[in-house]
Amino acid sequence: MKVIYFCDTSAIIKLYHAEIGTDYMESIFDDNQCTIMISELTLVEFDSSVSKKVRTGDISASAKNEAIKNFKMDCQNRFFVNPLDSRIIRSARKIINKYGNKLSIRTLDALQLGSCLAEEQEGLHFVCADSRLNKICKLEGVSTINPETIND
């Protein structure tokens, strides 16, 4: 069975900025036997994330431009980009209505999970560095990996 990693933005960013979890994400990226999926939403969230890193002084504007260039190339050559559609919007609404009263679930996180749930493939793991979102994934029966806590 082929391993499929559905990576949210908190995991993908680690490929372009060294931080906790980068080594694990690089091991996934370098494994050409696996599939790496991302939501189309990640395209927007990625740009927002690297812009924030410039604002906070974590990276320079030129490093941001380089990260965006590399990410764009990886979207064309390495990642399978799952388009957002009305089915994913409906799934995200269900997630928010199911868990939002008791657990913290942000809109964009619900869209990420909704995009993952739309895949319904064996061997799929949701890779995310957000423990709140991972908790909801587990409640939905989705296998999760947090690259920040994985033991090498």
Image (cartoon, rainbow, N blue to C red):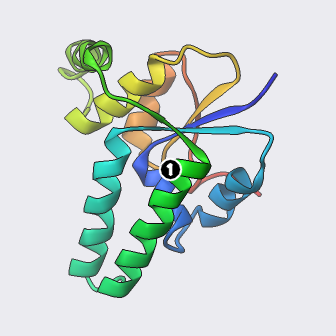
Quadrant position of the C terminus in the picture: bottom right
**Where is residue 135 drawn, in percent x and y?**
44, 31
Quadrant position of the N terminus in the picture: top right
Decide if residue 71 is on the left or right side of residue 100. right
Q: Looking at the image, which residue is at 40% across and 67% down?
A: 68
Decide if residue 26 is on the left or right side of residue 88. right
Q: Looking at the image, which residue is at 39% across and 36% down?
A: 133
Q: Amino acid at mark 1?
A: Cys
Decide if residue 70 is on the left or right side of residue 53. right
> In the displayed structure, would residue 12 be above or below residue 3?
below
Circle 1 is placed at which residue position?
75
Q: Secondary structure at mark 1?
A: helix
Q: Looking at the image, which residue is at 32% across and 28% down?
A: 84
**Where is residue 8 drawn, in percent x and y?**
44, 43
> In the displayed structure, would residue 58 be above or below residue 67?
below
> In the displayed structure, would residue 24 be above or below residue 83?
below
**Where is residue 142 drawn, in percent x and y?**
54, 22
Q: Looking at the image, which residue is at 40% across and 25% down?
A: 115
**Which residue is more in the foreground, 36 or 10?**
36
Determine crowd level at label 1: few under 14, some 14-19, many 20+ residues with C-alpha closer than 10 A.
Answer: some
Residue 106 in view in this figure:
no
